[in-house]
Structures are given as structure tokens and as C-alpha cells.
Amino acid sequence: MKKLLLASASVLTLISACTKEVEVADRAGILQKFPGYNEEGEVAQDIGIERLTTTLPQELGGQTIVANVMREGISEELSEDVIENNAYYISSQILKGDAIEYLDGEGFFIDGDAVDTSDGAIYVSGAGENMVGVGIFAGMEAENSLMIIAAGTEVSAMPTTGKYDYEGANFAIELSDGDLADADIGSFNAAVNFGTGEGSIDIGFDNIPVDIDGAFTVDTATGIFVGNELEMNAFGQTVDTATIHGNFHGEGASGMTGIYTNNIAEPDFIGAIAGHQQDSPPPVLLD
């Protein structure tokens, strides 16, 4: 598959991640690995998804950010220097670029004036303590590179009862023989019962006839949710299954983000979602 970057990033001063150095490779924050194997049966890649937490400096807002990051080199820690350099670089690119509006947020699309010709996307919705965002970066540090981020402010006052609906934006990358094939955009909606720790999600696209839906479970102590048996449907038929790893964000779990992939050793359909409770939609973004 396409090479994933060894760095984290900032999304409109939202997305950042840092970790402390540890000696073990399989850290507690690693959510999933996609080892991939060569013809000899040897591990051929070191790609995975990890959950990271950091506090932004005051000049970027000072919020505590929780991020899921899919990248290569998952067995090794990210260096703070690499994180800081990429965070400020991508933030500056966003601030210099022309933001576009999509649903209740705004973003910047990489290497393309139109969504369906873009090689990547950075998107953020909400403000202050209720921000969520996603980043899909293609070819940012190398011609054959890709990184996925889904992040938002740390959850507080997590509900333990009640049913809530969420809606938001959806971005995905399709890979073909290890190369970027298409960039897709759409939306998602989800329903969550925090009393039972159960939810369901439906992820759709504006430009391809694909739909991903199914159930997930929620850890109401941490705001983490996982669904590993989602169905990928095309033209009325189930063509694959998918897994999503995500987090709830903000006061009262006002926001929701996640990274999803199809369930194969070397995923070729990778995406991220970011949205908000519809009982408390995000504030209007001001210039």
C-alpha cells in the first residue's frame, strides 16, 4: 500500500500529537496493526493506528487534543521535533490557503481546486473546546506517502445515559496497487445509546456508489468507540467488511471522529470522519 508518513500534524491549529519515549514496541496506545506479508511470508510493513494525546500550546488554543493517527513506523515513537515541525508547517499552509466550506465546517484540499481531483484534505468543524477535525495527507513529505489523522478536543462530562444523533463529514482515499487512485468525500450519521454503550453508523459518499454501515461499541469511561464488523456495500451488495476506531470529543461528547479501513492485511480503502451531536451542533465558524 502507499507509504504512510512518520509524522503527526495540526489541522487548522487543531490536530497535534506527542508521546513520551518508551522502550516497548507494542504500546498501549496502538489500536490496530496492518503488518502485510511478502511472498516469503515475512512481515513487509509496519503500519497501524494509534491513539495519542497532547496539550496544545497557548498560542494554538491550549486545549487537550485526542487523536487517532494511522501511519507507517507504528512500532516506534514519534519524535517531538518531527511533530512540532509538521504541526506548524501544515498549520501555516492552511492559514495561507483558501478554505472551502463543507457541511458545518471548513477545510483545505491538497493538490486540487475541486474535491474530486484532490490528493488529500484537511477539515475542521466547531470551535474552542468542541473542535473536531480530520487530515488526509498524500505526498506531503514524499511522492509515495500517506497519513491519516482524526482528532478533537478531549471529552469531558461523558454521558452515561441517553440517546444521541451525530452527523458530519467523511473523507477517504482509495489505493490501487499501492498508488493513490481516488479521493472521495461524503458524510456520515450515527446514533449512540450511552446507557448501553452501543451505537450504529452509516458512512456515505457523494462521488462513488459505496456505503459503509454497522454497529460499534462505546467505552463510556474513555470516549473510545470501535466497530470491527461494518459492511461495505456497493450497488446493493456487500463487497467487504470494515473496522472503525474512534473517539468522542468535547463537553458532553459533543463531537465524534474516527478512522476506518477495509478489513484486509493491506487496506486499500482508508477514510476518516468528523462531526457533532445534532442536539448541540457546532458553532458557526467566523473569519
Image: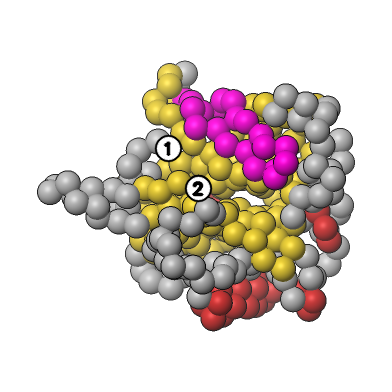
Q: Horizontally, is 284 left or right of 151 in the view?
A: right
User: What amino acid type should be assigned to the residue bearing mark 1?
Assistant: Asn
Furthest toward the front, the residue is 23
Quarter of the figure that contains the C terminus:
bottom right
Q: Mark 1 points at which residue?
A: 262
Q: Does residue 219 belong to the magenta stretch?
A: yes
Q: Mark 2 points at which residue?
A: 31
Q: Does residue 279 belong to the magenta stretch?
A: no
Q: Which residue is drawn at 50% across and 47% down?
A: 31
Q: What stretch is highlighted in magenta?
A: 210-233
Q: Main secondary structure of the magenta part?
A: strand
Q: Horizontally, is 167 left or right of 24 in the view?
A: right
Coloring applied to the structure: secondary structure
Q: Horizontally, is 127 left or right of 55 in the view?
A: right
Measured along the vertical axis of the image, is residue 238 above or below residue 244? above
Q: Residue at x 74, y 63 (%)?
A: 64
Measured along the vertical axis of the image, is residue 12 above or below residue 193? below
Nearest the camera: 159 or 99?
159
Which numbered disc flags the more N-terminal residue, 2 or 1? 2
Q: How far apart are marks 2 and 1 (CA)?
A: 15 Å
Measured along the vertical axis of the image, is residue 278 above or below residue 180? above
User: What amino acid type should be assigned to the residue bearing mark 2?
Assistant: Leu
* Quadrant in the rendering for residue 277: top right
Q: Where is residue 180 in the image (x, y as percent from the top left)?
A: 37, 54
